[in-house]
């Protein structure tokens, strides 16, 4: 049974256009964009989303975080008027705020359906897994405003699909369907719209079976080596492997394997 998450930080006493729920028995937190009908993400919400992910990262009750949107659309993007009202200094921090899911040590799943535009796409790209429905449409439409993506969208996308396809999306404000996103490696999985929630639920259950320590280590290692030389990445992989070799979870995993039973990982 999920319940409303309560934050101690007074800056999160009233959330702007989204809500957070926790399901303790599943060790799961849900960050749900909830400003119908298009779940526009305000400037204030960007600041709060960073604080929320940082708080959830520190909460020992939470193992997995799911980011989703209410209704037919994940998010049509940001509040356009807000860009003109914000100071240049504030705008310069947008990418740091939206990168919060990537910095979070825990697995973060984005559940995308319908419009997933602008900052909605960018924050999804900062997540570890993107489960999309067949109705999902990804886009970075900033060129239509005489702008470029400002929260890491083009940079992350280029890492995933290369410069040619990224130029096609960014410079033409092109919309990419969920199936195409899967084929291009943007999406982790593409499912029927009616199956989106159950597919995300199944992924949460699957991730909970693994060692939380190994999960955190894998996420950080992969993020840290994304732009590293191959030799550096291999060296860091070996060092992290050696560190986990000393963990209680690895010992439990080996013993469970030989005893043909389910491992009981504790994150130590």
Image: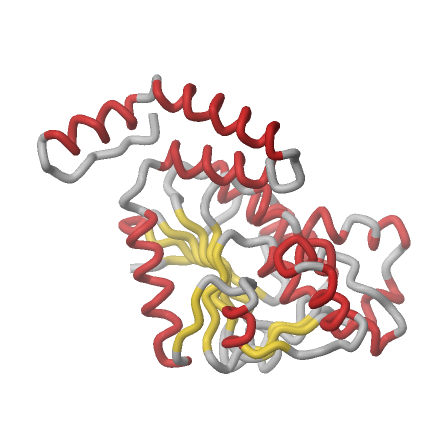
- Residue 158, above or below 105: below
- Residue 72, above or below 108: below
- Residue 242, above or below 177: above
**Residue 169 in the image, given as x and y percentages of width and height:** 72, 72
**Residue 76 in the image, given as x and y percentages of width and height:** 65, 76
Q: Which residue is drawn at 9% across and 31% down?
A: 259
**Residue 177 in the image, given as x and y percentages of width and height:** 57, 79
**Residue 30 in the image, given as x and y percentages of width and height:** 44, 58
- Residue 26, above or below 267: below
For residue 252, which quarter of the picture? top left
For residue 34, which quarter of the picture? bottom right
Q: Which residue is drawn at 34% across and 25% down?
A: 268
Q: Which of 3 and 26 is in front in this view?
A: 26
Q: Residue at x 46, y 37 (%)?
A: 218
Q: Residue at x 87, y 64 (%)?
A: 85
Is residue 222 found left or right of 62 in the rendered image?
right
Is residue 133 found left or right of 202 in the rendered image?
right
């Amino acid at each position: 049974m999920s319940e409303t998450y309560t934050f101690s930080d007074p800056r999160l006493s009233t959330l702007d256009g989204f809500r957070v729920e926790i399901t303790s028995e599943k060790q799961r937190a849900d960050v749900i964009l909830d400003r119908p009908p298009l779940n526009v993400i305000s400037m204030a919400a960007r600041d709060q989303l960073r604080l929320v992910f940082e708080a959830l990262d520190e909460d020992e009750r939470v193992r997995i975080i799911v980011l989703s949107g209410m209704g037919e659309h994940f998010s049509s993007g940001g509040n356009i008027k807000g860009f003109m009202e914000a100071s240049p200094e504030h705008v310069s921090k947008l990418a740091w705020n939206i990168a919060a899911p990537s910095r979070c040590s825990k697995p973060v799943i984005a559940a995308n359906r319908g419009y997933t535009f602008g900052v909605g796409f960018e924050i999804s790209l900062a997540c570890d897994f993107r489960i999309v429905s067949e109705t999902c449409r990804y886009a970075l439409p900033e060129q239509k405003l005489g702008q470029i993506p400002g929260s890491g969208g083009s940079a992350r996308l280029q890492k995933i699909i290369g410069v040619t396809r990224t130029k096609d999306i960014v410079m033409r404000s092109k919309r990419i369907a969920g199936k195409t996103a899967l084929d291009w490696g943007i999406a982790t999985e593409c499912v029927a719209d009616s199956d989106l929630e159950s597919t995300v639920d199944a992924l949460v259950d699957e991730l909970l079976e693994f060692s939380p320590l190994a999960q955190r280590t894998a996420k950080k290692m992969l993020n840290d080596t994304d732009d590293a030389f191959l030799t550096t990445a291999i060296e860091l992989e070996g060092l992290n492997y050696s560190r986990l070799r000393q963990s209680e979870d690895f010992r439990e995993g080996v013993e469970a394997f030989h005893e043909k039973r389910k491992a009981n990982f504790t994150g130590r």
